[in-house]
Amino acid sequence: MRKFRFKMVLLLILGGLFVLNFVGLGKSYTIGVSAQLVAHDWSIRATEGIKEEAARLGIEVILLSAGQDPVKQLADIEALIERQVDGLIILLAETSVLEQGVKKTVEAGIPVVYVDGGYVVPGVIQNISSDNYLIGQMAAYYLIDQLGPEFNIVLQTYPVLTATDFRTKGFKDVVQYFPRIKILAEQPLLGPNWVEQARTHTEQMLAKFPGQIGAFGVCSDLFGTGSSPAIDAAGLSDKIFVTGTDGLAQVIESIASGTSSMRMTFLQDSKTMGIGAVKTLKTFLDAGGVIPQEQGEEIVPRVLQVPAIMITRENAEQYVE
């Protein structure tokens, strides 16, 4: 009887060790991250989310930042492919980089999650972003609410990025129904010195259209950090509204001050986007997903949208860091 009990206890112990060992044998992955730039609040929060979630899941991360150089970013993607990463997160990229880069990842059988965009092609298993088209629409309605249905606006755009291009399209699709809203100028600012470019362009527009501009619609807060100070320096902070997107800390502080021409931005939860990107890749890889995917195969949702928060003078104070 004692021998029987001893054998039973031994089997239970061995069985328990087997279960523990089996649970601990979770697949290990290496994820590459190709970032257009890691230098401002949005990108820093996104990379923090990626690193924290990867650490929690036991995933190795190789992060390469291109410093806003599209040639380097494509080279970074190629370098990550050569290192045989299991999955790739692209953290913003110009369309030309995506077209060439994703073609190479498909050839290598590496799944891609694109953060803050809308690049829907085979090989990109998920796009994670806020609804950038809706952001553009809401920016238009905010200005109409504040300025009425008749004003002139200057747009500062970034058409080489899908996210910012969607914002511009959303804005235009609203104002086209208001014939007394006039777009005086639309200027692409292609960087890399966005702040200085935005400031210089704003000064030129103020000189060209004196007393005629009611608002500057900037598709990125980086532009706003150049255009808004130029407007304020001209003594026009109470006459011209600037709207942006990203929720940069200094922009939120400017809005909260109540004295800046910077009136509104959208705070995007880029950290949650980064976390979601890691989770998506792990889910896809755990399920044995392959690239290119079979027709109709959908292991993870093709789109994951993270809501953005509109920040105005009315609520900015509670978001000041």
Image (cartoon, grey):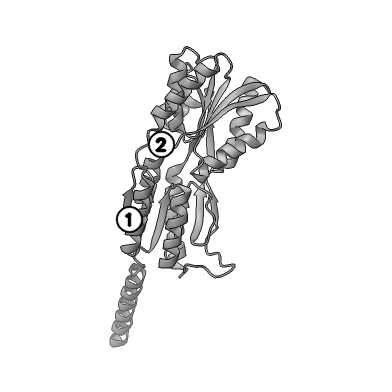
Identify the residue at image location x=55%, y=18%.
Answer: 209
SS type, badge 1:
strand
Q: Look at the image and tell me whether residue 321 can be seen.
A: no
Coordinates of residue 146 in the picture (x, y in percent): 62, 21
Question: What's the amino acid at mark 1?
Answer: Val
Question: What's the amino acid at mark 2?
Answer: Gly
Q: Look at the image and tell me whether residue 19 can be seen.
A: yes
Q: How many marks?
A: 2
Report which residue position mark 2 lands on: 191
Coordinates of residue 124 in the picture (x, y in percent): 49, 58
Q: Is residue 254 above or below residue 101?
A: above
Q: Specify few, some or many for label 1: CA neighbours under 10 Å numbering under 14, 14-19, or 20 or more.
A: many
N-terminal label among 2 and 1: 1
Closer mark to the observer between disc 2 and disc 1: 2
Q: Specify few, some or many for label 2: CA neighbours under 10 Å numbering under 14, 14-19, or 20 or more.
A: some
Distance CA(mark 2)–CA(mark 1): 28 Å
SS type, badge 2:
loop
Asked if residue 80 lies left or right of residue 296, the reply is left
Q: Residue 278's quadrant in the figure? A: bottom left
Coordinates of residue 97 in the picture (x, y in percent): 43, 51
> Residue furthest toward the top?
235
Coordinates of residue 144 in the picture (x, y in percent): 64, 25
- Label disc, if present, on residue 61 of the rendered structure: 1
Q: Quadrant of the C terminus?
A: top left
Q: Nearer the viewer, residue 316 or 83?
A: 83
Q: Nearer the viewer, residue 16 or 258?
A: 258
Q: Nearer the viewer, residue 239 or 154?
A: 154
- Label disc, if present, on residue 271 of the rendered structure: none
Identify the residue at image location x=31%, y=55%.
Answer: 62
Q: Quadrant of the N terminus?
A: bottom left
Q: Nearer the viewer, residue 117 or 281?
A: 117
